[in-house]
Amino acid sequence: MKTSAVKIVIVTLMMQQSIQSQETKKETVSAENKYTIENCVNHFELQKATKTKVGYQYWFADKDFTQENTLKMSIVEPGKSTHAPHHHIEEELFYILEGKAQFYLDGKTVIAGPNTSFYCPSNVEHGISNVGDTNLKYLVIKKDLK
């Protein structure tokens, strides 16, 4: 068999193996991410929440279950914030459920209560803190690009 014919056979075999590997991977991913009514409904349970330094957080949906979208509820004690103002590539949307929040965006602040949303564009410095005398409870929605 000529050298060029051997190369063609080898490349063909490699391509077939790659295709089979990709098909196996797709089947594995599909089996792992089988969505059912039971795992697509998530009711808040305090005992499943994660304690933080300033309160706690509860992931309704994380990027490993969804297609990189996240939905988290944060509860922050009076006078505290989850972290200092920061920025990141992902845009975020906050929705205030309870309490009084101070929202910082690009050098300016606003204070608002329940049924208010705050939008953070990509790479803009932002932060949220509890300026009330009760717990601040809010949702954080973003698509995780990491």
Image (tube, rainbow, N blue to C red):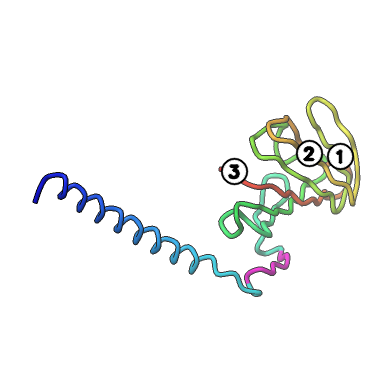
Q: Which mark is residue 131?
A: 1
Marks 3 and 2 sit apart, C-alpha to C-alpha, by 21 Å
Q: Is residue 67 above or below residue 120?
A: below
In magenta segment, residue 141 = no
Left or right: residue 123 compared with residue 129 = left
N-term mark: 3 or 1: 1
Q: Name the kind of residue labelled 1 in the image.
A: Val
Give the secondary structure at mark 3: loop
In terms of secondary structure, what is the magenta stretch mainly?
loop
Q: Name the kind of residue labelled 3 in the image.
A: Leu
- The residue under the point 50% across, 66% down is 30
Quarter of the picture containing the C terminus is top right
Graded by Cα atoms within 10 Å as few (under 14), some (14 to 19) or many (20 or more), the crowding at tag 1 reads many
Report the mark closest to the observer, 1 or 2: 2
Marks 1 and 2 sit apart, C-alpha to C-alpha, by 9 Å
Q: Tags 3 and 1 in contact by the CB under 8 Å rule?
A: no
Residue at the spot of label 2: 128
Q: Name the kind of residue labelled 2 in the image.
A: Ile
Residue at the spot of label 3: 145
Report the mark closest to the observer, 3 or 2: 3
Residue interval drawn in magenta: 39-45
- The residue under the point 70% across, 52% down is 56
Marks 3 and 1 sit apart, C-alpha to C-alpha, by 30 Å
